Image (cartoon, rainbow, N blue to C red):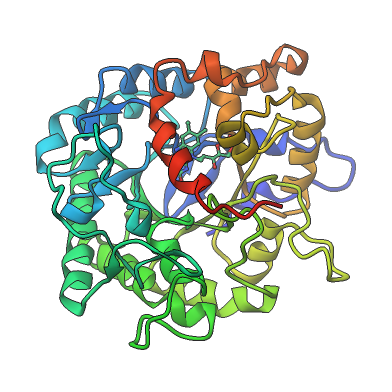
Amino acid sequence: MENPAASPVLDGVASPDPLFTPITINGRTARNRFALPAMQRASLDFRPTPRMAPTLRAVAEGGCGLIISEGSSPDHPAAYWQQVFSVIGDDTVPEWREVADTVLATPGVLFLMQLWHPGAIRLVVEGMSNPYPDQPTLSASGLVQEGRRNGRAMSAQELRETLAAYVHSARIAQDLGAHGVEIHACHGYFLDQFLWHETNERTDEYGGATLAERAAYPAEIVAAIREATGPDFVISFRFSQWKEVDYTARIAEHPDELGPFLARLRSAGVDLFNVSTRRFDAVAWPELDAKLTLPAWVKSFTDAPVLAIGSVGLSTDFAHDILENEEPRSQAEHDFDRVRLGLEAREFDLIGAGRSQIANPDLVSRVRAGELGAVRSFRKARDLAGVDEHFIHIGQIVAQSRKKD
Ligand SMILES: Cc1cc2nc3c(=O)[nH]c(=O)nc-3n(C[C@H](O)[C@H](O)[C@H](O)COP(=O)(O)O)c2cc1C
């Protein structure tokens, strides 16, 4: 699975820039190690707006190797939340086709479509349209965080229906020509609510004392998608320790829990682990002697490629920036030196830049040209102009009882 071309070059031969070495993931090659993580900002009425294709094209033409579409719901009534988020369903195929065709027109780009579900974070908010206002909110145990209930636990039948919706959406993505899908299981949303001990109280086969046990349902979804899409379709799995409702949350109290968790998902069919952190170079377990980042721990337990994401090029993490209005400074020069070291040391295989590529769709070209001083910082007012309302309700919901660091 690893790309042999990524090996360090020894004996005085000049190393190729590790950022610009192609990587092959389950037989599909991305031209370099840059990724655009899923960034919801161009959907309305549960479908992509005409703004989505040109926005992603700019990042593709800017040089990015792996592009992940905005988080979008499988077509299940409980996964519809606010109309500013897309659904990947039969009704939205025409809009998604334009997006997929546009991104795939750039050679060397790997294109994945992200499947995301709000789970217990879903609230039907007054003034926001929802085709299923009477649909109960469904999740692992009806919990947003410990002691904070919203909706209810899913029945076995609802679990089967939701799994079928994931598979259906993955098949649509495949029919559209996407190279794969990414399963969103992070930041406190639906599948993360299975992984996190605070939000999974199930006593059936989908709960349990260990992280690997609580990964049963996400792994079933991965396996079902693998079965339906065949061996060549790329499946990425995105997870995080932190949650929007709790920045200090942990799904794994100790790195040893990662081994069986990753192995379960890998054998279910995962080809890439997308490790979402608030800062890509932060030490994951400061109390341990081994001062490794979360992506580095993940890499130590799996042979699958690892994508690291979090504040690349910026002084302030996503949560403080988007949800609490702390404006970041650009620190591209510092961060890309660190990224190169991380790639060389095999801490991770790819690096995601979200806000930095929104502010600079040509970020990759600038890094290649060494023009790091010209990289702009992210400014919410400028870079999310017109899409800020996406976050108003998320902000209200998570602000209710957020634990901060
Ligand atoms: C506007 C915006 C939309 C986002 N949408 C998604 C999404 O759809 N799915 C997801 O997994 N993460 C989403 N995120 C989180 C980003 O993928 C990423 O993890 C975060 O911005 C941190 O990376 P950065 O520091 O490089 O921006 C979003 C973040 C922002 C700012």
- Left or right, 275 with respect to 25, comes to right
Residue positioned 48% across, 39% down in the render? 395
**404 or 368, which lies in front?**
404
Whether residue 352 appears in this view of the structure is no
Quarter-wise, where is residue 352 in the image? top right
The correct choice, above or below, for 220 with respect to 292 in the image is below
Q: Position of residue 110 (x, y in %)?
A: 42, 38
Quarter-wise, where is residue 293 in the image? bottom right
The correct choice, above or below, for 219 with respect to 276 in the image is below
Q: Where is residue 96 in the image (x, y as percent from the top left)?
A: 22, 32
Quarter-wise, where is residue 183 in the image? bottom left
Whether residue 353 appears in this view of the structure is yes
Residue positioned 88% across, 46% down in the render? 11
Q: Position of residue 57 (x, y in %)?
A: 39, 20
**267 or 45, which lies in front?**
45
Residue sticking out furthest to the left = 91
Q: How many marks?
A: 0
The correct choice, above or below, for 293 with respect to 108 in the image is below
**65 or 336, which lies in front?**
336
Q: Position of residue 78 (x, y in %)?
A: 21, 55
Residue positioned 62% across, 55% down in the render? 403
Residue positioned 80% across, 25% down in the render? 333
